[in-house]
Amino acid sequence: MKSVLIASLIALSAAAAQAATLDVHCTSGDAVVTAELNIDGKIISGNINADGSGIEDFKATATGNYIFYPAGSYYKFDDLEVIEFWGVSGKDSVAYKSVKGEQGVFTQSLVINKQAVQGTCVITKN
């Protein structure tokens, strides 16, 4: 139990010290969503832009969360990484969440105006 607690504290302090940027590019039909995000510890901030059917000329401030636990601290052999952010402008909204978990399983969700959409997203982390 003590080693799990120590590993969790190490993971938390590593995540807190981490600063990075994320560029997110998603397409869904003719809709395109892009986000330029900053990670500061566990907090995501930045800007979201979207345009296309149902969400024209969308610009909003992004808010979100970043969670990262290296292998051995949450899962025995795999990292856990969660990226989630959202933005609202007037009546329009965009939200995104991805989870990379055990055995390399990766899931992602894109929501435009409160409706989950089928799309493809690419994340670049610097």
Image (cartoon, rainbow, N blue to C red):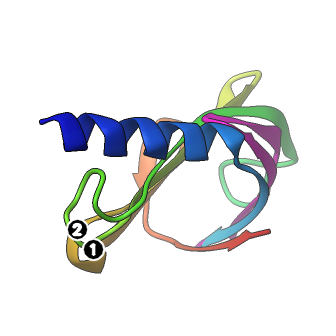
Can residue 111 be found in the magenta stretch? no
**Residue 114 against residue 103 in the figure, above or below:** above
Q: Position of residue 99 (x, y in %)?
A: 38, 58
Which residue appears at 22% of the width and 42% of the height? 4
Tell me the chief SS of the magenta region.
strand
Horizontal side of 117 relative to 120 (left or right) equals: left
Quadrant location of residue 94?
top right
Q: Position of residue 80 (x, y in %)?
A: 36, 58
Which numbered disc, 1 or 2, marks the residue closer to the eye? 2
Query: Mark 1–mark 2 contact, CB under 8 Å?
Result: yes
Looking at the rendering, the stretch of residues picked out in magenta corresponds to 28-48
Query: Which quadrant is home to the N terminus?
Result: top left
Horizontal side of 124 relative to 121 (left or right) equals: right
Residue lying at the far top of the rendered structure? 90
Label 1 sits on residue: 105
Q: Which mark is residue 102?
A: 2
Which residue appears at 63% of the width and 37% of the height? 16
Q: Position of residue 98 (x, y in %)?
A: 45, 57
Query: Label 1 crowding class (10 Å Cα cut-off): few <14, some 14-19, many 20+?
Result: few
Along the line of sight, the residue nearer the viewer: 66 or 116: 66
Can residue 36 be found in the magenta stretch? yes
Callout 2, which amino acid? Glu
Q: Which mark is residue 10?
A: none
Query: Label 2 crowding class (10 Å Cα cut-off): few <14, some 14-19, many 20+?
Result: some
**Residue 42 against residue 115 in the figure, above or below:** above
User: Which structural element holds mark 1?
Assistant: loop
**Residue 35 against residue 91 in the figure, above or below:** below
Quadrant location of residue 13?
top right
Callout 1, which amino acid? Val
Query: Which quadrant is home to the C terminus?
Result: bottom right
Q: Position of residue 55 (x, y in %)?
A: 71, 47
**Disc 1/disc 2 C-alpha distance (Å):** 6 Å
